[in-house]
Amino acid sequence: MLNLLEAYPFEAVMVVNPQHIEGMPGRKTDVQDSRRIAGLLRIGALKAGYIPPRPQRVYMAK
């Protein structure tokens, strides 16, 4: 999936560990999830995951 994202000129894409955004009780919807993620991002509660440089990822895949 990351290679797909690299093909488009996004200005900011953050890959986050899903465990950092889980834990919402009750029934969840995409709207509730997106609001929660936006709120966590707004207050700086999400930490971007480490993505190795492309040459390193290609080497690791072999």
Image: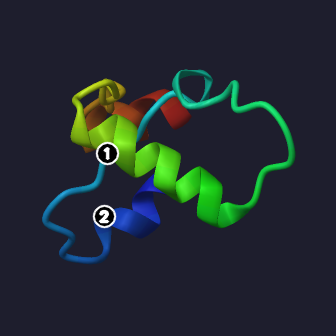
The percent position of residue 34, horizontal first and vertical second, equals: 52, 57
Q: Secondary structure at mark 1?
A: loop
Which one is nearer the viewer's eye here, 14 or 51?
Answer: 14
Labelled disc at residue 6: 2
Q: In the drawing, does residue 24 fall left or right of residue 41?
A: right
Q: Secondary structure at mark 2?
A: helix
Q: Which amino acid, mark 1?
A: Met
- In this view, the residue farthest toward the front is 26
Q: What residue appears at the point 19 percent right and 57 percent down from the top-left corner?
A: 12
Q: Which image quarter: residue 16?
A: top left
How many marks are shown on the rendered structure?
A: 2
- For residue 62, say whether it is visible: no
Tell me the crowding category of disc 1: few under 14, some 14 to 19, or many 20 or more residues within 10 angstroms, Cα based. few
- In this view, the residue farthest toward the bottom is 8
The percent position of residue 43, horizontal first and vertical second, equals: 23, 32
Q: What residue appears at the point 22 percent right and 29 percent down from the top-left corner?
A: 44
**Depicted 12 relative to depicted 18: above or below:** below
Task: Nearest to the eye among marks 2 and 1: give it.
Answer: 1
Q: Which image quarter: residue 5?
A: bottom left
Q: What residue appears at the point 28 percent right and 77 percent down from the top-left corner?
A: 8
The percent position of residue 6, horizontal first and vertical second, equals: 30, 64
What residue would you read off at disc 1?
Answer: 14
